[in-house]
Image (spheres, rainbow, N blue to C red):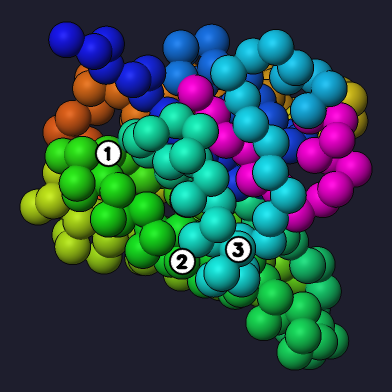
Amino acid sequence: MAAERPRAAIVTGGAAGIGLGIVKRLLDDGMNVLAADRNPKSCDAARSLLEGRSAHVMEADMTVEEQVREVMDEALVHFGRIDLLCNNAGVRHIAPLTDISLADWQESFRVNVDAPLLGARAVLPAMREQGGGAIVNIGSISGVAPYAEGGAYAASKAALATLTRVLAMEFGPLGIRVNCIAPGSIDRDSSGSISSSHIPVGRAGAPHDVASLVSYLASDEASYLNGAVIVLDGGATAGRTRPGR
């Protein structure tokens, strides 16, 4: 009897920052990983960094439906299966709603909402055929607790949280769980430049914090977790301190 193929994952925006941290963790978990990213320089750097590991780095724009299908096909060619799709790629435009251009507003929704939808629809046939899988969307606490001048980002991440819940209802009966992680302040490059004064645990998050939760959501340990939006912010949005304290 032929040995079962190792589990395989696709991580969008996987060539840098949080996405690269997720890729590294999944590789450590023994998964084959395809990292898709539209930044060619990041892709080149990731290829060098991940050389010799069970990773494949592919330049692709996940807002383009044809390229999304190419990513799925490439994963199946290289790995023979897809157990996890992590929709991590995102874009953030900071501007007052009175000033933000329509192009930037629309790009926020194309990258942060349309791309995860296209990815979920493209991965569905393979996951359904193999009997199940997991989709993890990377949202933001901005979708739960928005801030001024971040309206496009917040609105798109709130839409992603709702998309997650609807996908969970529609894909759940097919054995495909869909969940969303809403990170708070994440120090993507370990620069230490993010203030932690508003975070009860006393530090900003790191890519490995997000990656650990993705790893769990992709595992059988999370087999009953579906349609959840999990805030990962060190307690920053848990409540308010009393005035004068």
Residue 237 lies, in percent from the top left, at 53, 43
* 34 is higher (above) or lower (below) than 190: below
Residue at image coords 27%, 39% = 133
Mark 3 residue element: helix
Q: Amino acid at mark 2?
A: Leu
Residue denoted by label 3: 67
Residue denoted by label 1: 133
Which region is colored magenta? 32-46
* 212 is higher (above) or lower (below) than 150: above
Disc 1 to disc 2, C-alpha distance: 16 Å
Task: Locate the N terminus and report the quarter of the image it occupies.
Answer: top left
Residue at image coords 77%, 85% = 103
Q: Amino acid at mark 3?
A: Gln
Mark 2 residue element: helix
On the question of residue 205 being in view, the answer is: no
Q: On the image, which quarter does residue 31 sit in? A: top left
Among numbered discs 3 and 1, the one appearing first in the sequence: 3
Mark seen at residue 238: none
Task: Locate the C terminus and report the quarter of the image it occupies.
Answer: top right
Q: Is residue 157 left or right of residue 150?
A: left
* 86 is higher (above) or lower (below) than 216: below
Residue denoted by label 2: 118
- Camera-side residue: 131 or 217? 131
Residue at image coords 78%, 28% = 47
On the question of residue 222 being in view, the answer is: yes
Disc 3 to disc 2, C-alpha distance: 10 Å
Q: Amino acid at mark 1?
A: Gly
- Camera-side residue: 67 or 191? 67
Disc 3 to disc 1, C-alpha distance: 21 Å
Among numbered discs 1 and 2, the one appearing first in the sequence: 2
Q: Is residue 220 magenta?
A: no
